[in-house]
Image: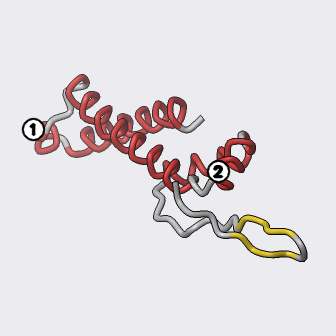
Amino acid sequence: MKEIEYIQVGDYLLPNLKVEEMHLNRFGRAKLDYLKKHDYLLYFKLLSKNELNDYLLKVQKEADDLYDRLVEEYKIKWNVTEELKQKNQIKWVQMMNNIKSCVDEIVYKTLLN
């Protein structure tokens, strides 16, 4: 666990609850937004223990891994290959956009809510 810094305000010591700047992708930012709006208790608990960054980065990595794995599985399942890309680029782009939309929805519903 990281060391928590305290600020003296009058006679009280209060934890310095600043969120360090993180490099979050869309999944990490979505989870942070979800915590702030729908699970404030967990957000404040993680923030007060100075574990919010680690939690968000962990969720982000899980979401990225799931996203990559599902995209590859759907490409195989729906037969979206490099051969299709060479023969019919428009169809390939349509299929890839469809796959990415489906996978986005799955990742958001399973890990980010």
What is the total number of numbered labels drawn onto the structure image?
2
Image point (63%, 53%), residue name = 49
64, above or below 21, in the image: above
Q: Position of residue 72 (x, y in %)?
A: 24, 34
Q: Which residue is mark 1?
A: 83
Q: Nearer the viewer, residue 70 or 87?
A: 70
Quick one: quadrant of the C terminus? top right
Image point (46%, 52%), residue name = 57
Q: Position of residue 110 (x, y in %)?
A: 51, 29
Image point (18%, 41%), residue name = 88
Q: Earlier in the sequence, mark 2 or mark 1?
A: 2
12, above or below 55, in the image: below
| Residue type at numbered disc 2 | Asp
Image position of 98 (left or right of 4): left
Q: Which residue is mark 2?
A: 33
Q: Quadrant of residue 40?
A: top right
Q: CB under 8 Å between callouts 2 and 1?
A: no
Categorize mark 2 by other alpha carbons within 10 Å: few (<14), some (14-19), many (20+). some
